[in-house]
Amino acid sequence: MKPQVLQVATNPNRSFSIRKDSIPNVNNRWHCHKEVELVHIHRGSGTQFVGDSIRRFKAGDIVLVGANLPHYWHFDQEDKADSSLQPNLLPYSSVIHFTEDFWGTQFLLLPENKMLKNVLEKAKRGLVLHGAIGQEVGKQIENVFNTEGTFQLIALIQCLLLAQHCTEADYLSSLGFEYDSSEFENERLHSIYKYTLQNFHDKIKLQEIASLAGLAPNSFCRYFKYRTGKSYSQFLLEIRIGNACKLLINTKMNIKQICFESGFNNFTCFYKKFKALTGMSPFSYQKAHISN
């Protein structure tokens, strides 16, 4: 699968790119670029695609995406709707882009920089940074924005050195992930993602989504599993449960309302699926997050 290749703009007075994104879904396509990307989500939530990883993201998440690793962040429609009325709720993030050799072709070859080279290698699978490490990286990202000159470089290096402490559990994409070079495959998978994210509240028939991809149902199931590492039904379930998690935390809807709003038409089924995926009941999940 060939993602859309994007050009990252840089300031003539800076060797790498920094920006604050306040437009939801500014790059709402499956894309890649030669630059490494470091993202800190300050506000907003949605679905994150990195390589063959598909998962929910939320405010506070920090993700390091390696060079040429396909990805995109799809913000929830509700976040975009709310922001039109309440500007302070507008999803936004800090984004840093840099090429692996922006500090010179010999820099990473220095024996003292072995850790930097290692973390850039890890980033090729995508890394999510959380806990104490994520908090420290978040502070250093802000230092990149709030300082100038050499101090910016030092702050960026600190971000990467902290990311070096990630574990196997922090990887996003699978070890063997590869993407097809066909532009047609890129468009086909993007259309599947887009249609699912727009229609998961309703019943999606297998024949329907397979037809969108131009495949017979059985062929579609094999195709999706091969491309993403999971079945389409599992993907759809994760999207729906993710939406339910967001509604449990952010709204006053009762749990049965949330069940139907998230695309389930049977409360017992919703309860079982929710507990299987999150490890707790909807009520326990809501109580735990509200108390925190």
Image (cartoon, grey):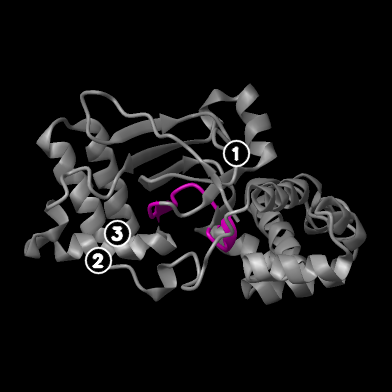
- Amino acid of disc 2: Asn
- Amino acid of disc 1: Asn
> Which mark is drawn over residue 28?
1
Residue 244 spot, x, y in % from top left? 71, 56
- Measured in 3D between alpha carbons, the distance from the residue under mark 3 to the one under mark 2, in whole angstroms, is 5 Å
Picture quarter containing residue 258?
Answer: bottom right
The number of numbered discs placed on residues in the rendered structure image is: 3
First along the sequence among labels 3 and 1? 1
Residue 74 spot, x, y in % from top left? 61, 44
- Measured in 3D between alpha carbons, the distance from the residue under mark 1 to the one under mark 2, in whole angstroms, is 30 Å
> Which mark is drawn over residue 118?
2
Residue 260 in the figure: left or right of residue 21: right
Residue at horizontal 63 percent and vertical 23 percent from the top = 84
| Magenta span | 51-67
Residue at horizontal 83 percent and vertical 56 percent from the top = 263
Residue at horizontal 41 percent and vertical 68 percent from the top = 170
- Amino acid of disc 3: Leu
Picture quarter containing residue 13?
Answer: top left
Residue 130 spot, x, y in % from top left? 39, 60
Please report contact status of discs 3 and 2: CB closer than 8 Å, yes or no.
Answer: yes
Front residue of 157 and 186:
186
- Badge 1, how many Cα within 10 Å: few under 14, some, many 20+? some
Q: Which residue is mark 3?
A: 120
- Badge 2, how many Cα within 10 Å: few under 14, some, many 20+? some
